[in-house]
Amino acid sequence: MVIVMKKQATERQLSRVLARVEEVGMQPHLSRGKVRTIIGVVGDNNDQSPDTFESLEGVERVVPLLGPFKLASRDFKKENTCFSIDGAKIGEKKIIMIAGPCAVESKDQILQAALAVKKAGAVALRGGAFKPRTSPYSFQGLGEDGLKLLAEARDVAGLAVVTEVVAPEQVPLVSQYADVLQIGARNMQNFALLHAVGESHKPVVLKRGLMSTIDEFLHAAEYILSHQNPRVILCERGIRTFETHTRNTVDINAIPVLKSLSHLPVIVDPSHGTGKREYVAAVSRAAIAAGADGLMIEVHPDPEKALSDGAQSLRPEEFQQLMDDLRPVAEAVGRYM
Amino acid sequence: MVIVMKKQATERQLSRVLARVEEVGMQPHLSRGKVRTIIGVVGDNNDQSPDTFESLEGVERVVPLLGPFKLASRDFKKENTCFSIDGAKIGEKKIIMIAGPCAVESKDQILQAALAVKKAGAVALRGGAFKPRTSPYSFQGLGEDGLKLLAEARDVAGLAVVTEVVAPEQVPLVSQYADVLQIGARNMQNFALLHAVGESHKPVVLKRGLMSTIDEFLHAAEYILSHQNPRVILCERGIRTFETHTRNTVDINAIPVLKSLSHLPVIVDPSHGTGKREYVAAVSRAAIAAGADGLMIEVHPDPEKALSDGAQSLRPEEFQQLMDDLRPVAEAVGRYM
Amino acid sequence: MVIVMKKQATERQLSRVLARVEEVGMQPHLSRGKVRTIIGVVGDNNDQSPDTFESLEGVERVVPLLGPFKLASRDFKKENTCFSIDGAKIGEKKIIMIAGPCAVESKDQILQAALAVKKAGAVALRGGAFKPRTSPYSFQGLGEDGLKLLAEARDVAGLAVVTEVVAPEQVPLVSQYADVLQIGARNMQNFALLHAVGESHKPVVLKRGLMSTIDEFLHAAEYILSHQNPRVILCERGIRTFETHTRNTVDINAIPVLKSLSHLPVIVDPSHGTGKREYVAAVSRAAIAAGADGLMIEVHPDPEKALSDGAQSLRPEEFQQLMDDLRPVAEAVGRYM
Amino acid sequence: MVIVMKKQATERQLSRVLARVEEVGMQPHLSRGKVRTIIGVVGDNNDQSPDTFESLEGVERVVPLLGPFKLASRDFKKENTCFSIDGAKIGEKKIIMIAGPCAVESKDQILQAALAVKKAGAVALRGGAFKPRTSPYSFQGLGEDGLKLLAEARDVAGLAVVTEVVAPEQVPLVSQYADVLQIGARNMQNFALLHAVGESHKPVVLKRGLMSTIDEFLHAAEYILSHQNPRVILCERGIRTFETHTRNTVDINAIPVLKSLSHLPVIVDPSHGTGKREYVAAVSRAAIAAGADGLMIEVHPDPEKALSDGAQSLRPEEFQQLMDDLRPVAEAVGRYM
């Protein structure tokens, strides 16, 4: 951490800051410039928040130097984290495809979707039973009935099930049916929920909040990891910007940045990231080329009748086509589908 | 709702869209242009989501015209919503001041803060017992012990207590101690939590998410209102932008916009909105001049020792000064402190 | 400046960085932590860009500590800069009102506007003769004919003329007619143009770019100041965010921040900042309450027939009403209209 | 265009809007809903700005339906625009590589860079002689001497020269030396400059402004096209968001969106888009996978000594490696290097 003193800070203020640094068990290194004095703060106690010093008199600002995430950090663990989702390893050479409808709507719909994505090569089925919706009057999902349909589709198609959990008290229920728990973008900083999935024994897909920085994203992962659940998959799904041609802006830079900062596997959701079916293929190719370990794609047997997000869902034959298009891209970067 | 057909849409696609509009009980009005055809969709069924039509073949985009919030809307209720918080009416001429520390830290701290803000003219005491923090390693609040200290401070100082609730299952516990429940910015779209406070009988301060549009903000309020709790206070607390001199950017435009769209009272939190003590006074004056019904201000008896957000907390004497500065501004816009 | 070395930086890399600091005439102060080494860099040569060190091997990042603006900075000049625009002093207790139509459209229109805003108490007339427009097919202004009409309106109404200049080679022409040159938001980083107005002898209203940070804004001012023109007025006019209810988001925080960092006068343009007539009054009151030295308001004798920006223009009687509303707010903060 | 009337609009206001639509030569189609009335506006006169109707009494808002760009639009020209830059065709199967230093610094530097990028397979040399810099005290480029060095490098290495022009009056000078003119991000809406390069006979690389929407970007291209210069290359170079790990956020979605809306070739600049050398390769691969027609990459013979942007410049051997990595990605999407 670096403390920058104000130009007009007094010697007394400076002494007080130095004393405070020592109080919390760290060491100050002073640099006096002609214009300004700065204090390098080093020591073991890296959890110390900048708050500790920011409010002292004479301090202009405090620049934190170590991200406070640890377990999520590549400094902490050098090699990639790999684990298996129902047999398929994520984080290794195979690109993991998770596909299915936005929401579970009916037995027919979810079975058709499951069989279609399995046939095309997906390893997991996505589908929401509890849907967080902007308006209280929109379709909120089938609830536990939806979970049962997902479990049935898993048995029929032979796919792992990935589904969202939206409240801490639901974690046990959803865990009965799901192979992988999903934390949605709007809940990325719902810390009670992160705590609860951290205590479950299921892998977690953690979606980046649509206005969350990469640091906040990794901190959210740290909540899960610090509650003893090491199996976290980071999912970039687009951030909110001023551009309106697409629903969100997929932050393609985030893939190499996350890979550099963290050992956790990274996937991309181009369906929510673009909001439009016609742009899904291009962004999927880009994600794999940039180093993503997998994709999460919305597929609906009949998008025109979807109760939510139809405009961004691929038809089964379009998903098949996507898989075919992605194969050479994966190979071009030393991976396979 | 207006459906815009693609330039190259076929007659068959058009007929299908028209049929679908009628299927959901609405009426289509066709406008055929030289270049493009558009369909005005009118009818009672205003909850119909644009999703219903967006995924049909030949549709370029769907422009929703009525915000799906109803109970929060000024169309639904013309006159301002006013209600009493422990005797003080919010939404009328008096500017309501809610003040206190970011977090409850100790009995001494909260009692000192409470007495100081009461003396200066606040009507409610703020203070977090459950703190949502970006990092799992930061101070997370005193929990129920913090709630007890708040209740004690209320009794001693004669102030209503406003405190945050972060998980649905905590609502009954927090309601035992608090006069007003607060939903934090990171939980603005935690729909399970909105549902739970909607079913409580306490007034709710709903903070705008730092990534949320005004429409999403009003939808979040709608969740609470639609669960039979009509006492919602909207709190603008700054949005995330690219500017870094301040922690967030207070959206001053939002005050007249919210007042125009909704009948609910609006307050502003300039402490989180700026993140720096020295800018709190200017933004407080601006908020009242723009029409806010109240302010939420962080005050700490000793900001240099605060466990969180010290840099943005006012000292008691600074808060007293702020109250004095605000009085003529309130009067200039026909209000009083 | 602070140089943060990578965790795995070698001693050789460190020596090379230290040598480079000395090469450019500055002094390095080393702080070795358990995890990371940081170097405080101090010296006279404050223009040194972080670029100089960022690209060295072993460097993780460079944190600049002194804003490279000097002449614009309050460190450089403590007291407020005040100067006169056609008799009225800006930067002192009087709130300066600049008002008029977006574009000069006809003799009638500009004369009516000028007389109306003069009567209500404005000190300067705004009106564009050269209009930068997003589309090449939109109305681009009357050019020199517009300048002549502005000059005529000045003589008739007794107002200073503020008008935009869009290319360096136009500066002499526009200077013949205008009392104050305006740099539009889209040209805030048109450095050739900043250079040209810096060499003119006219005061300059510099509008903040709609996605410019406060630092970039002050750097742009520095371009003008460093070419010997000390009379710069900073104009906050809203930044681009994700919110769409208003055209832009007026950054009210920027007023106290600019006042703290710089000695230059600050005005606000709530017409462009909100994009809607109905929100102009609330944001105008806020701007003055927050400490702005003046406002720039769009007024059109017949907004329904305006060739541009009609929706945000006040009618003459609305402007008169605004002036009346602002008077007590100005007084509440120790100013007058 | 669709005009949405306010809920409480009167019949008289409605008639006036209908009359105005006809006055400007368009046809209104009325849809009366229970809650709101909307007017579809169709006709030839597509340049009509929403401004024309937005300021009428009773109008809530106007939704424009046709982008006002024409010449840039795929509606106007279906097939891809391809043209030759010094022999290499852009817009066809070959991926065009433009590489070189941020700024021309010396004869040695530019010759070394030119020979290195030529050897690795680039078709054009980039290098700035006039540098737009945030601070007036930063290195501003060598000016005409830099142009001469570029021309010399072209002759020695056999590469086209791409260089930035920053003011309208410089266009003739820069055109004497350059094969392709570049408009920088900060000048994307410098309309006088767009006009000037539109009248030149040189191809133009137009960089997307870091605060510009895709529509504004295509409008800027339209300025050039409408002045009779059809050879425009669109360059996505990252937009400004809240994320700070990278300098900007490359909008990968923009590639398929631009390809869908426009016939113009699209390239990507991952050097400015990420701001860090270590992320350039991943984003380059992503850009090609997403459908870009080329890349612009910063390469410096000795990045540690670069006068600007060293941290994002590749060394010659890194550029060679990048070319090798990109080859299979290009082939995976049916292109070649």
Image (spheres, coloured by chain):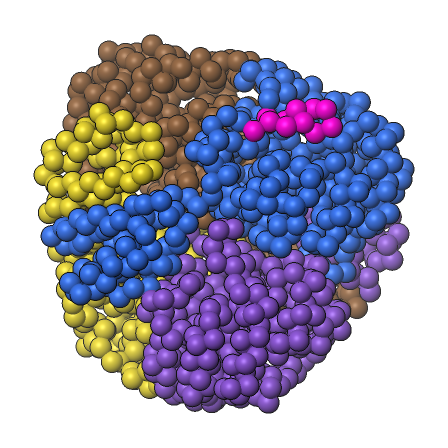
Chain colours: A purple, B blue, C brown, D yellow
Residue B264 seen: yes
Q: Which residue is depicted at the point 81% across and 50% down?
A: B143
The reply to whether the magenta stretch includes residue B84 is yes
Residue under the image location 51 percent in, 56 percent down? A133
Q: Quarter of the image for the N terminus of chain C: give it.
A: bottom right
C269 and A250: which is toward the camera: A250
Q: Is residue C273 above or below residue A141?
A: above
Residue C83 at x, y = what percent? 46, 20
Q: Nearer the viewer, residue A302 or C136?
A: A302
Q: Eyeballing the image, is D280 above or below D251?
A: below
Residue B302 lies, with reference to residue D323, above or below; the image says above
| Residue at image coords 86%, 47% | B145
Q: Nearer the viewer, residue D45 or A259?
A: D45
Residue A190: give x, y in percent of width and height: 65, 58
Q: Work out whether residue C180 can be spotted.
A: no
Look at the image and give the residue range highlighted in magenta: B81-91
> Horizontal placement of A140 versus B141: left or right?
left
Place of residue B207 in the rendered image (x, y in percent of width and height, measured from the top left): 61, 43
The count of marks equals 0
Q: Which of the 4 image quarters holds residue A245?
A: bottom left
**Residue C134 falls inside the magenta stretch:** no
Q: Position of residue B90 (x, y in %)?
A: 63, 27
The quadrant where residue A146 appears: bottom right
> Of D290 and C80, which appears nearest the observer?
D290
Residue sitting at x 42%, y 88%: A119
Q: Is residue C263 left or right of residue D223?
A: right
